Image: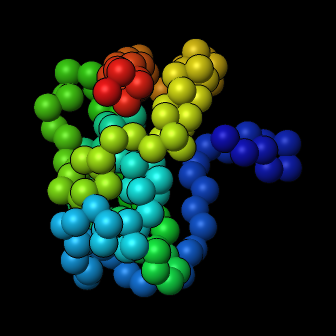
Amino acid sequence: SVEDKGVRKRGSVQQYVPTCGPVENFGMPRSLEEAVRMVPLDDAQAVACLDIRVFNTDRHPGNLLLVGERPHKAACIDHGCVLPAWWALDCAQFDAWLGWPQVRAPPSPATVSLVKEAVEQLPETLEELERLELSTQAQWTLRICTLWLQRAVLTH
């Protein structure tokens, strides 16, 4: 939420980022060496960690954008289908990056650090989401997916 002239308002914040286009307009090389020249290992793994943690049910090649020159940064857009109720955890869609060699590679040190930080901050994050009145079911989804991510990345 944001305070505007003494009134608390809810909403979202967005930033325009000039891009090369959606990842669907490009082909991701199948070899890890070539793929990291297109999207760095840390960027690709960070996108995967985000989508898993918030259980994005709508990540497809049209809402994952490439930014800048090679190696491109990955820019995620359209987060309207995240944190479903925990009982909807069979509805994942990670088509944008699921076949990427970067996410099949062992976690990078940056990815390990990212996941450790997410796990350490989970209690505070859940408190803030409770304060913002996010549904209990969505909070459970975040908890489950963060802990699953911890298990997958840190005990990989």
Q: Residue at x 46, y 74 (%)?
A: 72
Q: Quadrant of residue 62?
A: bottom left
> Residue at point 51% right, 40% down?
109
Q: Residue at x 59, y 20 (%)?
A: 120
The C terminus sits in image quarter: top left
Answer left or right for 99 relative to 79.
left
Q: Nearer the viewer, residue 68 or 128?
A: 68
Indicate left or right for 67 with 51 as reference: right
Horizontal and vertical percent for residue 112? Answer: 49, 34
Q: Nearer the viewer, residue 105 or 25?
A: 105
Comparing 132 with 39, the one in front is 39
Rendered image quadrant of residue 140: top left
Q: Is residue 139 above or below residue 90?
A: above
Q: How is the image coloured?
A: rainbow
Residue extending farthest front = 33
Identity of the residue drawn at 19% across and 48% down: 93
Q: Position of residue 84 (x, y in %)?
A: 30, 32
Vertical position of residue 28 compared to residue 152: above or below: below
List x then y, in percent, for residue 139.
43, 21
Q: Pinpoint residue 133: horizontal percent, then vertical percent.
A: 53, 24
- Number of disc labels: 0
